[in-house]
Every structure is written in structure tokens, then in C-alpha cells.
Image: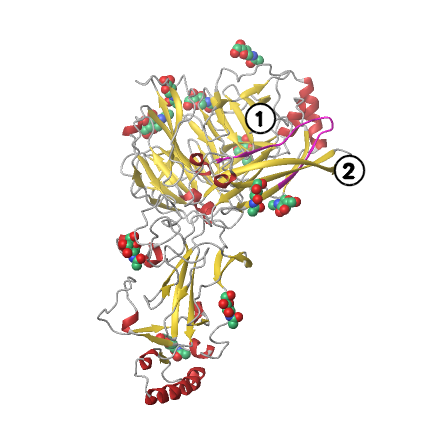
Amino acid sequence: MALPWLAAPWLWLCWLGSGGCLRCGDERLVYSITFAKDAKAARCTQVSYNRTKPILLQHPCSQYHFWGKQKISVYLGKDVFISMTTFESSLSPLSIPEELEAKEAVVSAIAFVHTDRVSMVINGRVYLYFKSPDRWVPSAGVSSSVSELSNVHCCYTGEDSQCKMVSWTLFAYDTGHSVSDSHIFLSKDGGYTFTRVQISTGEQGVLLGVYNFISFGLTGLLINRTEEDETGKAAGAYFRYFGTENNHMSSYSSAIFHLLSKGPAKLWSIHSLGLRGFIILWTTDILLISSNNGLIMDEVTVMPTKKFQNTTFPDSGFSLVTVSRSEIAVLTQDRQIFYGSLSLVTTVVYIATDKSIDLNTTVMLFEERGWLTLLSPVISNFSQLYDFKKCKFNLQLAIWRSQQSCDVEILEGDFQNKIYYIDMHENLTLNATFVPKPGKRSIPLVTVSNPHVLAFSAKILEIGFTYDGNTKYLLHIDLQQQYFSGFAERDFCDGLLDGEISTVTVDIPDKGIGCVDVAPLTALVAVSCPPTKHIRIFKNITACDKGLIQEAVLKNNFSYTISYEIYDPQFLARPNIQQDNLQIKYDFKNLGCPLLVYYKNPWVPILELWENGAFQKHVSAEFVMFEINGMHNYDYLLTASDVNCFSQPQNWTALLKEQESPDPHTAWTRRNYMSCKNRNGPELKWPSVKYQVLGGGKNKIIFPPYNGLYVFKAIIVDTFYSYCDLSITFSIYVYGAFPRSYLNFQATLISLLILILLLILTGYFLPHLSLKKIHPKVKVF
Ligand SMILES: *[C@@H]1O[C@H](CO)[C@@H](O)[C@H](O)[C@H]1NC(C)=O
Ligand SMILES: *[C@@H]1O[C@H](CO)[C@@H](O)[C@H](O)[C@H]1NC(C)=O
Ligand SMILES: *[C@@H]1O[C@H](CO)[C@@H](O)[C@H](O)[C@H]1NC(C)=O
Ligand SMILES: *[C@@H]1O[C@H](CO)[C@@H](O)[C@H](O)[C@H]1NC(C)=O
Ligand SMILES: *[C@@H]1O[C@H](CO)[C@@H](O)[C@H](O)[C@H]1NC(C)=O
Ligand SMILES: *[C@@H]1O[C@H](CO)[C@@H](O)[C@H](O)[C@H]1NC(C)=O
Ligand SMILES: *[C@@H]1O[C@H](CO)[C@@H](O)[C@H](O)[C@H]1NC(C)=O
Ligand SMILES: *[C@@H]1O[C@H](CO)[C@@H](O)[C@H](O)[C@H]1NC(C)=O
Ligand SMILES: *[C@@H]1O[C@H](CO)[C@@H](O)[C@H](O)[C@H]1NC(C)=O
Ligand SMILES: *[C@@H]1O[C@H](CO)[C@@H](O)[C@H](O)[C@H]1NC(C)=O
């Protein structure tokens, strides 16, 4: 932050000088005194960027985590430099091996992938570049020349796989052709391989961009309609949105805006701003910003001050636009600098003019809050490398000079930059505190980037005073899934099969440009499956507890036999199949000791819901079960009519037969479950069939007189229970039956005697299974 004793002399100078005044708070030349031996024997082609002006691109996450690891930034100019330290050392210009690109290598677009790689379009071809060790990998699958790349980054902290993988979704495309002729390629693996995406839109107009609006659940095409179309839609640019498979399919378009440019139009876009829904489009003539994923694009206006009395930018046009998470800086062609904070209504203020800025080499970047850095490469006097001239400009001071106020003292919330999950029917409360300046009535505004999945209500409570007597307020934001909120029509809400993400932001829109230190608060809310959520089986008593099987035996490569009569490898419960008995190795590591079930008691497993290693509740949802080896000598207690079905219930055989390659693990899930209570389902023709759905009712499993092991997989099928695909595999040991084959004997005295003998034997035998050490196989009847 500003050091007052340093700032004071310039302040004084500025008061004296007329007009703008730009002084570096800190000007220095960055250079290295030790150089890595650049033993690059390979012949290389130097890479260059052939736009008239240079630009600097920073990894969008570089300003999070206190400038942690992700510091990669690229200077694109006559020379291209890639720095891992925000240009804190001398660098040699980027070059590409001659085998890949001979003669010249002109880069037209770059995109950061993950934390350490850069995807680049060079001479129309796409490459993946790794900085250390210096390595180039040509991307596969881009079959025609492209010029642009786009992706977004998720910089929130938390172990979320969706967040981590966001930047791996990459679009490569060419602009300037009509939408129908444009080739758009999509990579899901971070730029290694692309596949062409077919977009049949019927849209007329020129393709200008493709954007992944992930926190809106949509992909957007930016289209410039050059003339009025047949249907009378006006000429102009707009976003056309497309859904992914399962979300609100009502694909729609944004409002029309104008992207005119006097010269040869080059459109720049800045999109990865914390997934909050901001997108910035600019050419040399226009600067537009949207806070709602492009639905409405607004022109950025200037707040008139004594030094700059216009509300519009100077006619000279724009030279550079740079953003941080919440700030924007603009350099115009006549070298005037403007600064503002990104907000629902973005307004900037004139800061300074510096005629000495060399627009051919200078770029701008935000390195730390309150400072703007101007950077330009200079060839070193001592080596083949380039040094970097860095001029840090104190924004806070400049803002203070332009008499911009800040109406807020504090805006804080411990949810800042974190990831949260909301599963179905769950709520989340986020809390923020804020303190307005005395006499000011600034009120925070809560926004979500994807109202199709996330609904909220907010309330403000007065909670006391700060030390200096200002009122302190608490803001509670209650978030819930839009689908269950009751706030919106069903078709406004996204589907229930796959989760989606949305950001929630708390900002104070009218806080004033002076609030350099008061940044908006944002959290990422994944309306999806919390990663640690799972189910377990409640085992009140196991076969080991009762001594029917000993744990040591089960652990010791225990195996058992399933009779040929009672299993079907295709899970279709076919009787009398010609096949052998099945030898099964017991998986003790995953199954543990089997749950003990008495054969005469109709039984249903009790499932428990766990999250973050803690028990949450018993599962009340509907689930289905199958025996993983295909055993089918059990049945269900209730019939379709017993459970008052309105439509014919689904069943295993029918669902397996519907599959191309039948697999019980995927045949019946929450994705295809249809409750028989649904009156719109297929007509109930056979009310007497057994009802194969458990849970949420009185249905149970009934066993025949049979002693032995079953390994069941239970799958929760209730569509409205969770975004998680919840399932559990567990074993049970059914006991208590007379061995069946002997029950077929005639009831004679002899058989009775045998029976009694056998009872004695079993009593002896079962608890001592452990004795069968040499051949740990048990034939269960
Ligand atoms: C960039 O290079 C391409 C070919 O390499 C050329 O057609 C184009 O005019 C160049 N653009 C500028 C602004 O120099
Ligand atoms: C969009 O089309 C208009 C003509 O309708 C043209 O003047 C303008 O330059 C185009 N904008 C871009 C960015 O290509
Ligand atoms: C304000 O705008 C007008 C018209 O666009 C222009 O003539 C004038 O020079 C501008 N004033 C300043 C201070 O830039
Ligand atoms: C900047 O580049 C343009 C053309 O590329 C050239 O005419 C101009 O002299 C350069 N300006 C400086 C200060 O080098
Ligand atoms: C490089 O040389 C120039 C001209 O000789 C000189 O002005 C400049 O200070 C030198 N730079 C450094 C880092 O020594
Ligand atoms: C979630 O919030 C809504 C509205 O505030 C409330 O009706 C509902 O009971 C809450 N649900 C839970 C599980 O707290
Ligand atoms: C916010 O406050 C409420 C009530 O004071 C509490 O239940 C909730 O856990 C808090 N939220 C967070 C994210 O700490
Ligand atoms: C175990 O729990 C089940 C279900 O609650 C119950 O039916 C059974 O009697 C219990 N067994 C014992 C031994 O407590
Ligand atoms: C279990 O079987 C595996 C291979 O089938 C064998 O390597 C291992 O030694 C056996 N363990 C015991 C305790 O017999
Ligand atoms: C399974 O469902 C199909 C179609 O509804 C039906 O024809 C068949 O009889 C059912 N089978 C059983 C065992 O319920």
C-alpha cells in the first residue's frame, strides 16, 4: 500500500502541474544476474504476435491464494515472453522448434490450461506448451485453420473435481466466417485432443466468439449479424446460448448490442473473472461489459471529475484494457489512464495521462491491490535476454486525488472464494458483515450467476457497533436449489440429473470508486453431489458376532460355492440353466463380516447416509437391490397392488433387456427410475407382480429355507433424493433354515432321526468353520 512519505512529494508536484500527472510510485528494471545455461541446440523459430499492439495475459487465478503457485503470465508483442514469476527475471523470447513451425511463427491466441500450461494458436495450428521443461505438443483433431481459443478458470479453493477441470474445456475456432461455415473444435482434455462440434443453429451472421459460461450452465456464441435478417431482427451483435444435454433447453439469445469499429476490427474479450458472470468485450472503439453472462452488454461510462469532465472516453479509442478480480484499468490511444471497479454498473474515473508511454511495447497488469503496473521489455546490455521495466503506479493515491469517496468501511464474509455444495432439498446460509460509513446508506446486493439452479433470500440484521461507533450489519443469505424453492416455474429450473455450479456474489454497487480495498465477496456453490456423501449399511449384528463364521476364516482367502440352480449370470432369474456351480472368492476387504439375517424374517437393509465422515440420517429414499453374482433364490414381499401402484412398476428383467449390453450396475438408477405412483406411467396391467423397489414403504425381501451368503448391491433410485449416485455393496448371511435337500425326504422316523442328527451336526459345524483351514471352501446348500 501507499507509503505516505513517498507519496507526498508527487502529490505536491501534481497539485502544481496542470492536467493529468502520472508518476510511478516505484520504477525499476527487473533483470537477472545469473542465467540458466541455455544449451538450446535445436533450431528454433521465434514466436511473435502480429497485432499492432502488445498485450499481457495473466493466469486468471494468479490473484487468488495470495499469489500462490499460479503466476504464469504471457507477454504478447513483437516478441513473446512467458513468465512464471510475473516478469521478475530476465527472459529470452519464446521460440518454437523448426520442425514444428519453420520460417515464421505468428501466435494469434493463447489460453492457460490448468496451472502451468499454455495452449497456443500458431500459424492457425493449435499447440500445447509446457514451460518447464520447455516442450511443445501439437494438439490433435483440429482439422482446419483456427485463430482463437477460449476457456475459463475456476479459482475457488476446495477439492472440487468440477472446479479443477473447468480450464480443461477449451474451444478453438476461427472468426470472421458465417456461423454455419465456422469450424468450432472442443477439447475436454486440456488441449491435447479436439473434436469438431456441430452447431446447427440457423443463425445468420458472423461468428466472433465462443464462450463457456459454465456458471450459467450454457455455452454462448457471439454472433455479429451484419444486416437485418428476413424475420426483421435488427443488425448487431448478440450472444446465442446453448444448453448442455440435461439443462433448460430453452436456448435463447441476449439483447442486441453494437460492436462497431472504424479500423480493421479485432475483438478482445475478457471472461474468466471468478465465474461471476462478467464478460468484457472491447475493440479499439468500444468497451462493453456485462455482469450477467452477456444477456445485457453495457457501455462503460466515465465519472466526470474536475480534470476530466466528459462522461465518455476520449475519441482516440482504446489501447489496452486490463482487469483484476474486481478492478478494471483502461489505457486509451492518447495515453490517458482510467480506473474503476467491476460492478453491476461499471464506472471508471480518469486517473492520469502519460505521454511517455510507448504504446508499441507497454502493457498493463494488476499485481497487487491498489497498484497498477506498466511493463515493457528492454533488451539487456549484458546478455541475449530481455529485462523488464516495471513502473508501479499508486492507484489509491490517484483516486484520493480525484476526490473519489468510498461509502463503505468493511465488507467481510468467511465464505469468500470458497466452494460449497447444496444437494437436493438442502439449504445453505452464508453470512457477511458490513459497515457503511457514517451517514451513508449503502446496501449490499446479492447476485447469483445461474438463477436456473440457485435461489436465495437475504436479510439484514443490525448487530452492534464498531470501535469507532459505526453501525455494523449482518447479512444472511439463504441459498437453496431453485427447483425446490417454489420461486420459479418448473421450466425455468435446470434438470435434476446432473448438478451445476453457480456463483453467489455480495457487492455494494454504489459504494463509490474510492473503495479500492473493499472487494466483492464471492463463493462458488455447486448444486450437485457433495464429494464426501455416501451410504453405508447398518449392521446391528454380523455372522461373526454370533460365531457362525469366524472373521479370521473370511480374511483368509475364503471362498464359497453357489449352486447352479440358484444363480443366473445374466441377472434375469432364469430357472433351470445348464451351468456349473459358481465358486466365489469372498472380498473381505470391502465387505467385512456379513450381516446376519434369519431366513424366516422378511428383511430390508437399513441404509445410512454419511457425509464428511459423520453419520447424517437414515435413508428414507426408494432403492433397488440385486445379488452381484446373479443369485435369485429370494423374492419380494409385496406386489404392485399391495403398494397401491397407479402404473406398472419397473422391474429388473425389463430394464436389463432394454440395455444394449445388460449390466445391473447401470440398468436401474435414479436417472431412469419411474415411480409406480406416477399416474402418467404405463397402465397397471399385472397388479399381482412382485414390487421390486425397497425403501420408503413396507416392502421387504423374503428368503427361502436356505443358509448362505448373499452379496447385494443397493442402489438409491429416488430421483429427488440426491445428486449423488448412491450405492453400497454389502454381504448378508442367512441362517436358521433346515438344509433343504433333506426336507424332501418322506416324513419317516428315519428321516426325523437324520434330521435331529444333522441339527446336532450343524450346531457343531457352523461355529467351527474356522477349523477347515486347509481347504477354506464351504459348500452352502
Ligand atoms: C498477421 O499475420 C497474418 C499472416 O501471418 C497476416 O495476414 C495479417 O495481416 C497479420 N496481421 C497484422 C495486424 O499484421
Ligand atoms: C459487426 O458488423 C458490423 C456491420 O453490421 C461491422 O461494422 C462491425 O465492424 C462488426 N464488428 C466486428 C467486431 O466484427
Ligand atoms: C469531451 O467530449 C467532446 C465530444 O466528444 C470533445 O469534443 C471534448 O474534447 C471532450 N473533452 C475532453 C476533456 O476530453
Ligand atoms: C510504433 O509502431 C508503429 C508502426 O508499427 C511505428 O510507426 C511507430 O513509429 C512506433 N512508435 C514508436 C514510439 O516506436
Ligand atoms: C544499458 O545501456 C544503456 C546505453 O548504454 C544505458 O543507458 C542503460 O542504463 C544500460 N542499462 C543497464 C541496465 O545497465
Ligand atoms: C430451507 O429453506 C426454506 C426457505 O427458507 C425452508 O422452507 C426449508 O424448510 C429449509 N429446509 C431445510 C432443510 O432447512
Ligand atoms: C451463518 O450463520 C448461521 C446462523 O447464524 C449458521 O447457521 C451458518 O452455519 C452460518 N454459515 C456459515 C457458512 O458459517
Ligand atoms: C437388527 O435390526 C433389524 C432391523 O432393525 C431388526 O429387525 C433385528 O431384530 C435386529 N437384530 C438384533 C439382533 O438386534
Ligand atoms: C490368498 O491368495 C493369494 C493369491 O490367490 C495368495 O497370494 C495369498 O498368499 C493367499 N493368502 C493366504 C493367506 O492364503
Ligand atoms: C417386468 O415388466 C415387464 C414390463 O412391464 C412385464 O412384462 C414383466 O411381466 C415384468 N416381470 C416381472 C417379473 O415383474
Disc assigned to residue 339: 1
> Magenta stretch: residue 366 in it?
no
Q: On the rendering, which quadrant does ligand 9 occupy?
A: bottom left
Within-10-Å neighbours for mark 2: few <14, some 14–19, many 20+: few
Between the C-alphas of marks 1 and 2, the distance is 32 Å
Quadrant housing the N terminus = top right
Seen at 35% across and 52% down, the residue is 649
> Can residue 144 be seen at all in this image of the molecule?
yes
- Please name whichever residue, 80 or 299, is drawn nearer the observer in this view of the structure: 299
Disc assigned to residue 326: none
Please name which of the two marks, 1 or 2, marks the residue nearer to the observer. 2
Q: Is residue 197 above or below residue 536?
A: above
- Please name whichever residue, 463 or 314, is drawn nearer the observer in this view of the structure: 463
- Please name whichever residue, 323 or 648, is drawn nearer the observer in this view of the structure: 648
Seen at 46% across and 54% down, the residue is 621
Q: Amino acid at mark 2?
A: Tyr
Q: Is residue 532 above or below residue 522?
A: below
Region in magenta:
431-451
Residue 477's x, y, as percent? 60, 39
Q: What SS does tag 1 mark?
A: strand
Seen at 59% across and 22% down, the residue is 349
Q: Amino acid at mark 1?
A: Tyr
Pick whichever of labels 1 and 2 is earlier in the sequence.
Answer: 1
> For residue 680, which quarter of the picture?
top left
Quadrant housing the C terminus = bottom left
- Please name whichever residue, 359 or 180, is drawn nearer the observer in this view of the structure: 180
Disc assigned to residue 467: 2
Residue 691's x, y, as percent? 37, 57
> For residue 283, which quarter of the picture?
top left
Residue 672's x, y, as percent? 36, 49
Residue 344's x, y, as percent? 55, 28
> Can residue 85 be seen at all in this image of the molecule?
no
